[in-house]
Image (cartoon, rainbow, N blue to C red):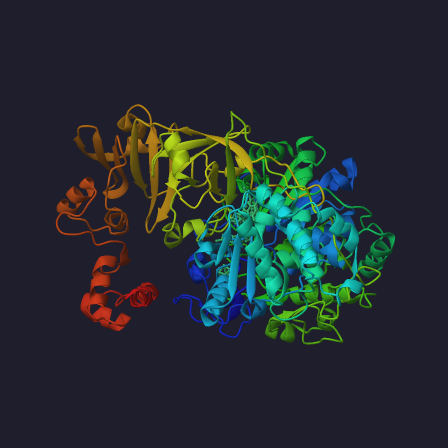
Amino acid sequence: MKTTCPYCGVGCGVEVKDLNQPVSGDSLHPANYGRLCVKGSALGETLSSEGRLLWPQIHGSRVSLAAALDHVADRLRDIIAQHGPESVAFYGSGQLLTEDYYTANKLMKGFIGAANMDTNSRLCMASAVVGYKRAFGADAVPCCYEDIEQADVVVLVGSNAAWAHPVAWQRLVQAKSDRPDMKLVVIDPRRTASCDLADLHLALKPGSDSALFAGLLNWLSEQDAVDAEMLPHLMNVDATLAACRAWDLPKVAATCQLSEQEVLTFWQWFAAQPRVLTLWCMGINQSQTGSDNNNAIINAHLLSGKMGYAGAGPFSLTGQPNAMGGREVGGLANQLAAHMGFSDEDVDRVSRFWGSSCVARQPGLTAVNLFKAMERGEIKAVWIMGTNPAVSMPEGNRIAKALEKCELVVVSEVSARSDTADLAHVLLPAQGWGEKNGTVTNSERRISRQRSFIAPVGEAKPDWWLLAQVAQRLGFADAFAWQHPCEIFAEHAALSGFENAGRRAFDISALATITPEQYDQLAPVQWPINELVPGGTARLFADRHFFHPDGKARLLPPAIPVTVQTSERYPLLMNTGRIRDQWHTMTRTGNVPRLMQHYDEPFVSLHPHDAEAHGLRQGDITRVQSALGWWSGRVVIDTGLTRGQLFIPMHWTRQFSAQANVNGLVSALCCPESGQPALKQTAVRLQPLRPAWQGWLYLTDVMQPQEVLYWSRAPQQGAQRYVLAGQAQAADWLMQQPGMQALQWQQAQAGQQLHRLGWHNGRLVCAFYAGPALPEIDHGFVACAFADTSSSPQQRHALLGGRPAQGESQGRTICSCFGVGEVAIRRAIEQGCDSPASLGAALKCGTNCGSCIPELKNLLVTLRVAQ
Ligand SMILES: Nc1nc2c(c(=O)[nH]1)N[C@H]1C(S)=C(S)[C@@H](COP(=O)(O)OP(=O)(O)OC[C@H]3O[C@@H](n4cnc5c(=O)[nH]c(N)nc54)[C@H](O)[C@@H]3O)O[C@H]1N2
Ligand SMILES: Nc1nc2c(c(=O)[nH]1)N[C@H]1C(S)=C(S)[C@@H](COP(=O)(O)OP(=O)(O)OC[C@H]3O[C@@H](n4cnc5c(=O)[nH]c(N)nc54)[C@H](O)[C@@H]3O)O[C@H]1N2
Ligand code: SF4
Ligand SMILES: [Mo]
């Protein structure tokens, strides 16, 4: 079965042949041609029903689906009747399928009649949408992934593609190795994994990108690097150039805190080649000048004419699998539908198409304002789907308070627990990847199918179905009568072409008559897809015709760069972002032990001097505090940072650590044009923690450790592992935790070092190792003891010591049936075993249930690559 990866906006094609085998890349999908990154290849490991939300719940109690849907519809109807349609809101996600998104948008804007439908794309793509619309008159990304292979100069701005868009990155790596003359410029205050391959890394001052690109525009015009043939297609050229004139080389270098030579080299490389591709992401969008940053980049491509052909253009990378699909349906509160806004003409057109007389006439509340209105009591009901705002929104603590204040909080989720789901009144079980069926659109406008290939767990339903059921109960049965996602897709396609006549970039009208069979067969295709271009379109604007009424593109004057001011109290500047193996708030990737191996705890990267100045060393625990709150995690020394700046990943939540949601620290300052929060800059200070003891706690079940300075959880095969830091006595702390009194204990104590095993009915349920410093134990060995129920007294004794009795550690258990560890398997491979069968013959691994064969294959591949 062919489907699409549900993680990043690269939108890789995935092939699932056998549920017992790892998934593989679809060799025919144009986004990845068979490649997958580590998250994509671990997709099979996320399919378990463990941790899934199986049934609807109201106030924590299981109810029938019908009762839950009735309740949601009744409460919405009452609240709307009492307080008007503006008192309810939907908060969606770029992780919904297009069909889900279309349904939510149609219900809120078309039939409830308010435009309070916003999405987590506000935190992600809103500035890019404004940038493209202002420049081109349409939210239309001109480029495609093939341009990565065709470019002579690739500029990566505010993007750590090596970790966040790994397959697009692999294409770049391949292209650069095929054509070593190709140049890569990385513009990022940090030296990231994406800098490994860079010919030039500009570690500019955070927030100063618009100066760098304003200077580039000025320099292009001074150097006569302007495209004379493009000029007749541009507006605002003189005014923009006049506004850029002040940005000469010395001023740009000083503002960006770069050397003049560095800046000039970038400008020269940009000017020298026709095939220049600029790729950008959150370092540009999540800024108080996010929209202007986008236009500063687009300006340079417009004036130099470097776009509309292979290998060139301004290419904003989308983050989520369906961020682009959300933009198509109008999922942002300031859009109506299908690239239409709130002009009288658009409202009238959409009203006629939907057959509704109450279509919203003005934009609704954008995410930050929506939650502020909730805090003020103005939003009384919210339905959150496919996103975890209690973690991902700035001023995270206020979001939780706002939700606590809201009369009705409905959350459709795949996970039973999330920081947001924990605050819901009504939980609706949504189908997840592998169960749901529909379409997504990636960064390059390519629509691909996500297909269902497993039965849904419990009573999980597609998001569109849950929405349509509520719509029907609200009295809109005719408009939400679909039986299959294909019907929704066809309607969406028809709306895109409705009275379009070439005025709206988003046009997939050629798919408006799609049949269920064709929908099932739909091959990945890039929009526009209409009568003129039925096979789709790789690149836009080759004809230099844009979507403003006069057909011309616009240049925009540059923004004055904004960097958050540090102070004596908060002297450091905090940056936030992603790590390679986790996805957002970890509801899926956090449960895959393999994906926890890269980083298994919340951490703060510090410049060595900043660490030293605070008496912190690698591996210490520290608090980070801003004016809004504090965070705690482990110190990682990173020489790639500029002094005075630190970096914290966005991923950890209450489900995984004590106080590790970085958004508890981040303020909700936004770009005024896009409403996108500036999540990359916060003034903070460090407060090292000096715990009395530190330790490891292995448990069979998840718990919420109490009264401890710091904890963090990392799931292992068969156990949950907590790392802890506390005050007072470790032994006292342990016995105060829920359920501990009831266990039978085995103990070993040497000085301040305490090791304990807790048994219940002869079964190991707890292992605890604590000391003044973090005890060194053999994690593979301890985790294995939880998976293996047959233990001898000698083994128990060794387990109490935290390492195997004699000889070496056996590493992670790979084959549970025969207890074969990674170390033995590695040795056998080194000694010549070259297939699961030969490993099985030598060690017996994989010869019983066979479920470790994929893992054996992975080891064979990785070791062979490494050799
Ligand atoms: N592994 C993984 N991949 C993902 C995701 C994930 O959660 N995990 N999420 C997906 C999503 S939704 C998104 S939006 C993308 C995000 O993808 P990226 O934007 O590439 O990822 P981030 O780590 O958020 O930020 C990128 C870089 O911006 C830099 N930066 C900070 N401030 C500035 C600045 O002022 N100027 C410049 N030029 N750079 C700056 C940061 O140092 C960081 O390296 O990733 C997608 N892919
Ligand atoms: N400080 C800081 N904050 C950030 C960012 C940053 O760089 N720094 N980046 C921002 C960006 S770009 C983004 S995109 C956001 C992402 O932030 P969120 O969208 O809040 O993060 P996710 O963990 O992806 O949340 C998705 C939720 O939907 C659930 N889910 C998964 N599949 C489905 C489904 O099919 N249906 C339903 N109903 N639910 C599903 C998951 O279990 C999960 O709880 O974070 C933003 N916040
Ligand atoms: S690059 Fe993105 S879409 Fe491709 S496999 Fe990795 S996470 Fe999935
Ligand atoms: Mo995102």
**Closer to us: 845 or 390:** 390
Residue 855 in percent (x, y) is at 33, 63
In depth, the one of 850 and 459 nearer the eye is 850
The reply, left or right, for residue 645 in relation to residue 63 is left
Task: Pinpoint residue 761: horizontal percent, then vertical percent.
Answer: 25, 41
User: Quick one: quadrant of the C terminus?
Assistant: bottom left
In the rendered image, the vertical position of residue 573 relative to residue 831, given as above or below:
above
Task: Locate residue 757: give its quadrant.
Answer: top left
Above or below, comparing residue 740 to residue 455 in the picture: above
Residue at image x 13%, y 51%?
807
Q: Nearer the viewer, residue 614 or 710?
A: 614
> Does residue 139 appear anywhere in the picture?
yes
Q: Write the residue at 69% across / 73% down.
A: 514
Q: Is residue 730 left or right of residue 439?
A: left
Question: Viewed as shown, does residue 685 lie left or right of 798?
Answer: right
Answer whether residue 333 is visible to the viewer in this image.
no
User: Residue at the spot x=19%, y=40% of the render?
Assistant: 800
Q: Residue furthest top?
A: 728
Query: On the rendered structure, is 574 left or right of 476?
Result: left
Numbered circles on residues, count: 0
* Horizontal and vertical percent position of residue 538: 65, 71
Residue 289 lies, in percent from the top left, at 66, 43
